[in-house]
Amino acid sequence: MKVRVNGEERELADGATVATVLDLLGAPASGVAVALDGEVVPRAAWPSTTVPAGSAVEVLTAVQGG
């Protein structure tokens, strides 16, 4: 299935979860926030939240600086 991840079209297996997307991106274990179609997904729900075909996933990482 096709989804948009951070504005880039990606092919994911049916039933992929938010956690699957983070693994695919190699996202760090902390300092990450995820939105699915504009709605924030709580960290505890990442393994159980499926990503529907055609949806948009935004993965944001915290950056330290001044």
Image: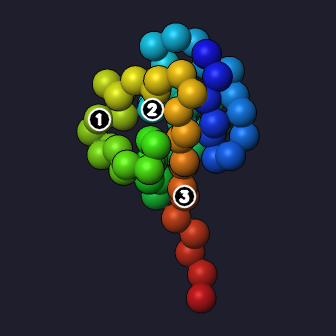
Residue 29 rendering spot, x and y as whole percentages: 47, 45
Q: Which mark is first along the chain, 2 or 1?
A: 2
Residue 45 rendering spot, x and y as whole percentages: 29, 35
- How was this image coloured? rainbow
Q: Amino acid at mark 3?
A: Thr
- Alpha carbon separation for disc pair 2 and 3: 15 Å
Q: Nearer the viewer, residue 65 or 18?
A: 18
Image disc number at residue 45? 1
Q: Give the residue drawn at x 47%, y 23%.
A: 52
Q: Residues within 10 Å of mark 1 (few under 14, many from 20)?
A: few
Q: Amino acid at mark 2?
A: Val
Q: Residue furthest front?
A: 54
Q: Which mark is first along the chain, 1 or 3?
A: 1
What residue is disc 2 on?
18
Q: Is residue 49 left or right of residue 36?
A: left
Q: Is residue 51 above or below residue 40?
A: above
Q: Considering the numbered disc 3 on the image, is that residue within a helix, a strand or a loop?
A: strand
Q: Residue 30, can we see it?
A: no
Classify residue 24 by image quadrant: top right
Q: Considering the numbered disc 2 on the image, is that residue within a helix, a strand or a loop?
A: helix
Q: Residue furthest bottom?
A: 66
Quadrant, the N terminus: top right
Residue 59 rendering spot, x and y as whole percentages: 54, 48
Q: Residue 9, can we see it?
A: yes
Quadrant, the C terminus: bottom right
Q: Considering the numbered disc 1 on the image, is that residue within a helix, a strand or a loop?
A: helix
